[in-house]
Amino acid sequence: MLPKDSIAAECARRGRAEVVAGCVALLGGRTVDDALVLALGGAHGAAVLDGGPETRYWLRVWAARGLLWEWSAAAVPALVAALGDEHWRVREMAAKVVARHRVGAAFEAVEALRADGVARVAAAAERAVRVLVSGGD
């Protein structure tokens, strides 16, 4: 099952607001129930739940990806904070969310990421800035 489909199914089960709240919690480093982690992370979710702290950043990546498919303005503060995450995959996915949902409140944070040392983050940030400035892709 694709992440988009898994997230949609989880929204149907528990409600969109609860899924978004779970994504916000994970982005903030808080724990959520294992079923949500498995819905967000798919087959890899169990490995991260059983793994050590070095793999826990995947929870934040998946939380941001969850917001890619199920967005709410209530997630803006957590998304902006995720743009400053220590792990590049979290920053990259957060920038993708900014672009997809045109999150203007994240402009300054995403603009700063255009100079990120990780090329994929910088590219995602560049696209997000372009979308925010032009209003299109």
Image: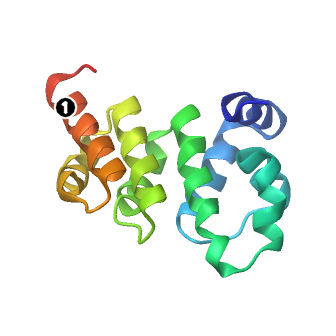
Q: Nearer the viewer, residue 90 or 26?
A: 90
**Dividing the picture into quarters, in which one does residue 22 lie?**
bottom right
Task: State the image coordinates of residue 66 (x, y, percent, origin top left).
Answer: 60, 43
What is the secondary structure assignment of the residue under circle 1? Answer: helix
Residue furthest front as drawn: 119
- Snapshot colouring: rainbow
On screen, residue 44 above or below 12:
below
| Circle 1 residue | 130
In this rendering, position of residue 66 left or right of residue 114 = right
Q: Residue furthest top?
A: 136
Q: Name which residue type carries label 1.
A: Arg
What residue sits 14% from the left and 30% below the top?
133
- The image shows residue 92 at horizontal and vertical percentages of 40, 50
Q: Position of residue 97 (x, y in %)?
A: 43, 40
Q: Nearer the viewer, residue 131 or 118?
A: 118
Question: Which quadrant is home to the N terminus?
Answer: top right
- Residue displayed at 25% across by 60% down: 116
Among all residues in the image, which is located at the extreme bottom? Answer: 53
